[in-house]
Amino acid sequence: MTDPTPEDVQRYIAQGLACEHLQVEGDGRHFSATIVAAEFDGLSRVKRHQRVYAALGDRMRQQIHALSMKTLTPAEFAAAGASTPAASAQTHH
């Protein structure tokens, strides 16, 4: 089984979760994702992550070795927009 690409992981999440914004980066084994979904409204961070894990299903155990997530509601994402340039200024290796 080949390692998934960031695009694969993005597609897997999108198939199981209606996202308003979804961005995934990674190297085939370790991934980071920014996931914006209206259904996160009112859910704790743990519940939001559980919802993403449910969307990924068995892939989380079999193909994806590490996934760090930023899970936001559309309102939280819009509010974070002011700090987006600083966040994107991080260096990527």
Image: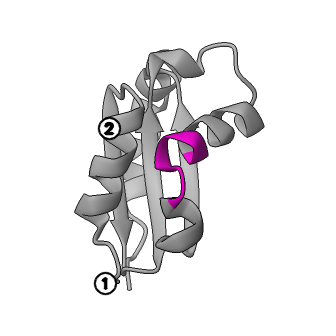
Q: Judging from the image, what secondary structure is the residue with disc 1 in?
A: loop
Q: Position of residue 36 (x, y in %)?
A: 43, 31
Could you tell me the amino acid type at mark 2? Gln
What colour scheme governs how the chains and residues are painted in the rendered image of this protein? one colour
Reading the chain from its start, which is encountered first: label 1 or label 2?
A: 1
**Which residue matches tag 1?**
2
Task: Please state, as top left, top right, bottom left or bottom right, where the C terminus lies in the image.
Answer: bottom left
Task: Residue at 35% x, 49% y: name it.
Answer: 12
Q: Position of residue 4 (x, y in %)?
A: 32, 73
Range of magenta residues:
53-58
**Which residue matches tag 2?**
15
Q: Quadrant of residue 81?
A: top left
* For the residues bearing labels 1 and 2, Cβ distance under 8 angstroms: no
Residue 54 falls within the magenta-colored stretch: yes
Task: Please state, as top left, top right, bottom left or bottom right, where the N terminus lies in the image.
Answer: bottom left
Crowding at mark 1 (Cα within 10 Å: few <14, some 14-19, many 20+): few
| Residue 75 higher or lower than 25, as above or below | above
Distance between the alpha carbons at the discs numbered 1 and 2: 20 Å
Task: Residue at 36% x, 29% y: name it.
Answer: 19
